[in-house]
Amino acid sequence: MESELSKVSNYIHPCYVLDNTTYIFTSNPSIICVALYVFLSLLSFCTICGNLLVIIAIIYFKQLHIPTNYLILSLAVADLLVGILVFPFSMAFTVFSCWHHEGLLCKIRGSFDVTLSTASILNLCCISIDRYYAVCQPLTYRSKIHSHVIGIMILVSWGVSALIGIGITGAGFNQGKCEEQCLIDALISTTLACIFSFYVPVIIMLSIYFRIFLVAQRQVRNIQITNQSTTVNKMERKATKTLATVMGVFILCWTPYFICIIFQPLTFDIMPIAVIETLNWLTLSNSMLNPFIYAFFYSWFRSAFRLIITGKIFKNDLTNTKLF
C-alpha cells in the first residue's frame, strides 16, 4: 500500500506546484494548465451547442417527426446533459485535481457518469431494435414501431439508467475518496456495473446489427422489388448505416475506458491518473461527435442546422419546410 501511495505522489499535476510535501494550486498556471482548461471548455461548449442543434431540429421541423428521430432526440438529450452536468465535475477533477477533500463530489460525478452513460447505451440499444424491424421486417415495421412504442422505449431506458446510477451511488459502489484518487478507488467496486451497463448491451447491439447486415445482404441478392421499393430500401439501409456508425463511434470511445476498469484490479500497479483522465475524456468526447455524424450523413440535418444557426426559424414559420 505504501509503494502504491508513493507512485501516486510521483504524479505532478500541470496546474499544481509542490510545496514541501503537499500540492498547492498555483496562482501562476503553466501554459499546459491554461491550454488544458481552454481545450476542455471548448469541448464542453461544442457538446452543448451540437446537441442543442439536434434537439431543436427534431422538435421544430415536422419532417423530422419520425420514430427513429425520437430515439435520436433522446440520445441527444443524454449527450446534452453530459455537456451540462458531467463536464463541469470532470473539469474540476482534471484541472483542479482532487481539491475537494470530501466524497460528495465524487459520488455526484459517479452518479451522473453512470446514469448518462447507461442512458446513452440503452438508447442505442433501442435504435438498433428500431433498425432491425425497419430492415428485417419492413412490412410490419410501422405497425410495431410507432410513437407509443418509442415513448415506452425511451421511458424504460431513462428509468433503468436512473435506477442504476442512483443505486450504485446509494449502495456505496462508487465512493471514491478525493484524498487519494477518486477514479481509481472505485475501479474494483464498479466492475460488475460495467459488465451489465456496457458489455452486455454492446454484445446485444452487435448481434442485432450483424443480423441486420445478413438480412440486408440477402435482400440485395435475392429480392426483386419495384423502383419505389428500392428507393425506400436504400433509405432504410442508409439510416441503418448512419446509426451503426453512431454505435461504432460510441464503442471506440468507450471501450478503452471500460477495458481499463475491468483489467485494472487484476494488475499490481496503479494506473497513472493522467491515463485514467485521458480515457475518461475520450468517453465524454463521444457526446460531442454524434451531431457531426448526423450532419455528415443526412442532408436534411445539415439543412435544419443551417436554418437554425442563421436564425431563420425565428423570423418565419418554417416548421413545414421541406428539408433536403
Image (cartoon, grey):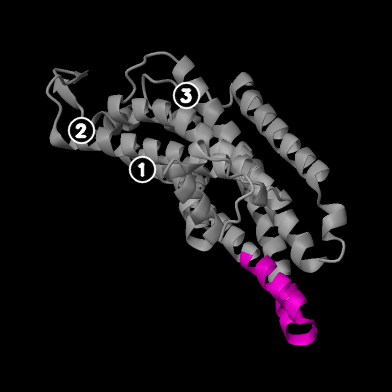
**Percent x, y of residue 148:** 82, 41
N-term mark: 2 or 1: 2
Residue that carries the numbered disc 1 in the rendered image: 278
Q: Closer to us: mark 3 or mark 2?
A: 2
On residue 33, the disc is 2
Residue 159 in view of the camera: yes
Q: Give the prevailing secondary structure in the magenta stretch.
A: helix
The stretch in magenta equals 215-238
**Percent x, y of residue 74:** 63, 40
Residue type beneath disc 1 = Thr
Q: Is residue 46 left or right of residue 209?
A: left
- Is 226 included in the stretch rendered in magenta? yes
Whole-Å distance between the Cαs marked 2 and 1?
15 Å
N-term mark: 3 or 2: 2
Residue type beneath disc 2 = Cys
Q: Are marks 2 and 1 in contact (CB under 8 Å)?
A: no
Residue that carries the numbered disc 3 in the rendered image: 176
Label 3 environment density (alpha carbons within 10 Å; few <14, some 14–19, many ≥20): many
Q: Residue at x 52, y 50 (%)?
A: 304
Q: Residue at x 72, y 68 (%)?
A: 212
Residue 259 in view of the camera: no
The N terminus appears in which quarter of the rendering? top left
Which of the two residues, 125 or 78, is positioned nearer the viewer here?
A: 78
Which of the two residues, 99 or 128, is positioned nearer the viewer here?
A: 128
Whole-Å distance between the Cαs marked 1 and 3?
18 Å
Label 2 environment density (alpha carbons within 10 Å; few <14, some 14–19, many ≥20): some
